[in-house]
Amino acid sequence: MPSVTLLGQALVSGVLAGGLYALLALGLSLSWGLLRLVNLAHFALALLGAYLTYQLGHAFHLAPWVSAAIIVPLFFVVGMGLHVVFARFRVTEFTSLLVTFGLAVILESLIQWFWTADYRRYETPWASASVRVGPLFVPVLESLACLTAATLALGTWAWLRFTYVGKALRAAAEDAAIAGAFGVNHRRHAFVLSGISAAYAGVAGTFIALISTLAPSQIWVWLGVVFAVVIIGGLGNPVGALLAGFLIGASESVTMAVAAPAWAPLVSFSILIGLLVLRPERV
Amino acid sequence: MSGRARLVVGALAASLALGLLPLVGLPAFYESFLYLVFHWVALATSWSILSGYAGYFSFGHGAFFGAGMYTTTTLAAGYGVPFLATLPVAAAVAALLSAGIGAVVFRVKRLRGELFGLLTLAITFVLATIVLNTRLDGGPGVYLSNVPLPRLVASPTGTFYLLALGLAVLAVSAAYRVTHSRLGLGLFAIHDDEDVAEVEGVPTFAYKLAAFALSAGIAGVAGGIHAMFVSYVTVGDTFSITVPLYVVLMSVLGGARHWLGPAVGAALITASLYAFTGGQQALLGRALVAFVLIVVILLLPEGVVPAVLGRWRRRRQLRWRRGSDRSAQRGAHPRPSEVPGAPAAVAGLESAAAPEGERLHESSAGAPAGLECRDVWKAFGGIQALRGVSLGVGPGEIVSLVGPNGSGKTTLINVVSGHYSLDRGRVELGAVTLSGRPAHEIAGLGVSRTYQIPRPFAHFTALENVALAATFGAAGGAPRDARAEARGWLEFTGLGRRAAALPHELNLHERKFLELARALAGRPRVILLDEVLSGLNPAEIASAIGLIREIRGRGVAILFVEHLMRAVLELSDRVVVLNEGEVIAAGSPREVMRAPRVVDVYLGKAHVVA
Amino acid sequence: MIRMRRFTRGGGLVAFLVLAFAASAVAAPAGQPIRIGGTLALTGPLGPTALLHKLAGEMYVEELNKGNGLLGRPVEWVLLDDQSKPELARSLYEKLITVDKVDLIIGPYATSGILAAMGVAQRYQKVFVHHSFGMPHLAKYEMHFATAAFGPEPNRTIPTTVFDALAATANPPKTVAIITSKFPSAQFQSFGAKEIAEKRGLKVPLYLEYEFGTRDWGALAARVKDAKPDFVWIGALGLDGNQMLEAMKKLDYTPPRHFHLFPAPGPLVVAPDGKQALSVTVFEEHPPFMNNPGAAKLIPLFRERAAKANVPYTHVDTQVAGSLAAWQVLEAAVTATRSLDDKVLAQWIKKNRVDTIIGKLRFDGPNNYGDDLFKVKQVQDGKWVVVWPREFAAPGARLLPP
């Protein structure tokens, strides 16, 4: 029988890992839900952000938050630029898969060109730092990532809920024609949203560099779990994505603590299937 | 030779020529390269049968592929079953798996779109975890070196090539058969609007299940063959993101709604994988291929095959117009997928006369019959929408159902048509009980309806919209007869000239009349008209009223939901007034309109609203 | 293409070319080139390590051509990218053999690809030397020769070497926690470690297998911490071990001793938690290995080349040395038999010992395997040094803590 401390520790670590999933899921969820674009390039952008953080830290000794301050606005512009292409060619949900897949492959090649295929690891003093809370240890970086995810999720939620631009975007996602009839300039707002989504990829990238390890093909390792988080959370629902991240992270981690770790995906995804089939209206 | 026959002969000749390729003595590499091409052709084509046609976007094709792969692996390596004998089992296991999933999932209405995608993705993870942690694999992978490969031809690569070719031909011809059958028509309708498809008579559940099982079965065989081809089977390679992702990409590139689209997409993408395998340009090559993919899909968003066909057809049509006076287009009719700009047989319309009253009578689903609702109750959560509604409509009778908004009129129509099940009571058509039957069966028995806000199938032309109802409704014709029938009904509703138009090209009045034509094409005994007149101008209303009279004249029972009092008074034999889910008055129009409760409900409300 | 890329990166290119030219002028091989075909996972998930094999092979071929080539003929390496996909590896080997008609072939990177290629080699009866195969019991082809010198039963011999090394310390472990990735070769050897440990009377309170691709290490780390073992065997690939150590550190736990089966060597050396990490190797850059044939010449060349290619960790260890050994075996066989005939070459290799950069290889045992050449190494003072067996240990080095 696993100890309570072990369970608690697994829960903490799972929830925090879920925070990172959510951080990656946020931007994807926004563009999928509100622009109807399934952006596979989101993962590539995040990894590019991670490599840039690594490079700036490694070669120029910039602190990661300084790097983030450079990367995030840069990615915002990149996101807007991407949307120029999407808007110009009227990319749909269906074709967006292919377009952004191509983009992701190009970015992957670019990353490999500059940084080679070899593993990179950004060593920082914070990597193994943690805070002790009672019998549990709470890792600093993961908590920061989780906190950032929560802040961004709530901020985005408020932005969508209370500002004109946010309401306009949601209205346009429901029915672009009617929203247009009410004078909502969906196109202009879409650029902002695309920029934000890419900027979030940059934020996620910074944390990936700090927490995880880097290799070009790792673009694809996040795909499955983050897709799951995006959809369970509800497309275009930032807070939902956050909670879904926690759910998947925690259920996997607790399984790993109490049972054979290799069975972990079975548990989390069975929960997911059960939820979908039995309570589809809650998803 | 007709276009279709030419296609079949051409396809046979091509398959035969490809089948003889191993005898030519090409270097083995080409066989093995073509093996991979056909392997992906089979996978992508099979994916599109459910996901492309019906729009049930699956991210779980890897699960069925993997199920097939491990079936063959387990049987051949573990139990010494001959390799070829494992393939039907692989198909069966994958198909059963999908049918099991479908039997649960397809009953849940909300599990469409991305939720279905997620569900299938999750199932892939679950399956991979089970295989990884049980004796099926357990982690170290399974090596099939001891499994003898039957020699179809001298070389092993030739054998694999023939197996994959056979499967690809099977998959593509299955796709062709599906798209040119009732099944395909139904799947395309499900893609556009599943609820309407069901109400029009498409057995959506059975069709989705059939498509899913067919799709998974083919993927299972592909997996079984591939297990032998790679000969070392591991969970990591089998259940990777590659299969589910690539089949989507290939289908999108080629055109997921065309039977040949995924095959072309698969060939293009697989070939491009090989274009840059040289050690030095690998990286640049990958990026270049990706860039070309982006450009192609941006320029041809509907996919390569539909785009090329569309262009070709437009050119051919232009030549026809210039050249001869041939008025009818030959060959297979364009599928809904090929529709943009497709010249559906407008010219042939003049010849098809409107169905005559007599004929309608005879070929309807049996003798005229009346509709009877007895004590119908329906609640949504805490809201009681219908409280014991009873009403009847006789053959050749028009009964108007009136009442304020939210009084339950549309709910009643949804209950009668089978879209909602009722909580209590019965609905009968003549001697047959309708309640409790699925909507498509009710449609088949001769009940059709219109929607207040028209819900045509967006990718179907006006003609195809009506033809679908003619195919699946009570008339139940073969698709080809259904088109002639549909032309007649378009003429009848004055839409003859708009036969080739897509719904978004029609104005509101045309769409309303399209609803009507579609409802009539099912040859109903009962027709439920939900505010067909709203939003029409006086001239259009007059012509609609004329149409409705004519329909009644043919012995159809009409339940007429309408707010427009002038039309109600003009048309109705009887009027039923509904308020808060209860019948508060029924009788002749004049009687009912004078009843104090009705005046109260109507005028009282009117005052409040005003 | 290589040259162009290097050109864009600048850095000593001119000097290098001049040198290369000067060297080739000495004894220029002449005639039709001998073409040796192979694939590597230049892109995709196996890319990180395949890159090292590419650099090693390119260097080796260039060195051959600076000398007298093979049989006096220049050597050309026809290298294709299998994109980390076994089915692609298979068909590309068919291409190399049936379309490009290369004279000889050399193996791709990693177990799955090698098995796929081995089937092709068998059908066309090509001698097949490869450098990174982890499951010796699966290699049944009579003309395959592995320079990943695991011996026929690495699941027995490698854990034995490791536990021998530990047993020789003053404070040998009594309890062992084993956590392993479900990656086939890692799981295979880690499961062997469990059996060997138990056979030796050690307690194994924790044996965990996790899914290859796990992202959350917290729970695993917590379980190891809970088990309080004297020694942790981490059957991990790439950077999994780093992540595992970090996760344990976050729980304020550092295992007394920890072993990593297939780590990416560079990151573990620089990681603060990697101190005294144990692993196995066939080569490190110190004596006696530097006295092995070719080492003194090839190692500096490789490091220069790797640095130019922007590889973060340029030291030569198991992967690169194994790769070089494969080329050495091929060269030795061709030179000794003066033949390119696959059967002749295979016969020679099977019968003879080949003295390579990783030591004396023989191929006359079960499945053409010879001795397990793996030694135990440890991170000490920021670099890997061999600590066991004693005769191979770096000067003055021994397993810490003693």
Image (spheres, coloured by chain):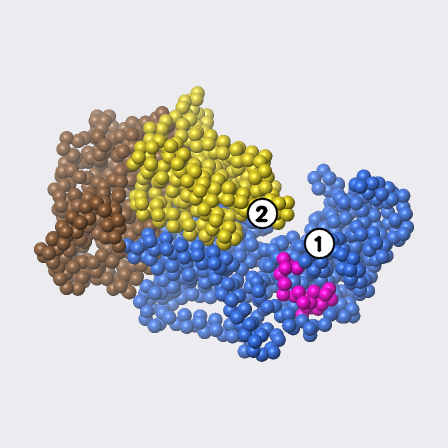
Chain colours: A yellow, B blue, C brown
Residue annotated with mark 1: B451
**Residue C276 percent coordinates (x, y):** 25, 30
Residue annotated with mark 2: B111
Magenta span: B484-506
Q: Residue at x 26, y 50 (%)?
A: C5
Q: Residue at x 56, y 34 (%)?
A: A158
Quadrant position of the N terminus of chain B in the picture? bottom right
Q: Are the residues flagged by discs 1 and 2 from a single subunit? A: yes
> In the drawing, does residue C354 fall left or right of residue C107?
left
**Residue B352 percent coordinates (x, y):** 69, 72
**Residue C4 percent coordinates (x, y):** 25, 52
Q: Foreground residue, B561 or C147?
A: B561
> In the drawing, does residue C137 fall left or right of residue B363?
left
Residue sitting at the far left: C26
Quadrant position of the C terminus of chain B in the picture? top right
**Residue B143 percent coordinates (x, y):** 35, 52
- Distance from the alpha carbon under mark 1 to that under mark 2: 23 Å
Q: Is residue B499 visible?
A: yes
B277 part of magenta stretch? no
Q: Residue at x 41, y 57 (%)?
A: B292
Q: Reading the chain from its start, which is encountered first: label 1 or label 2? A: 2
The amino acid type found where label 1 is placed reads Tyr
Residue B85: which quarter of the image? bottom left
Q: Which chain does tag 1 point to?
A: B
Crowd class of label 1 (few under 14; some 14 to 19; many from 20; radius 10 Å) = many
Q: Secondary structure at mark 1?
A: loop
B486 part of magenta stretch? yes
Q: Foreground residue, B311 or A134?
A: B311
Q: Main secondary structure of the magenta part?
A: helix
Q: Residue at x 41, y 45 (%)?
A: A44
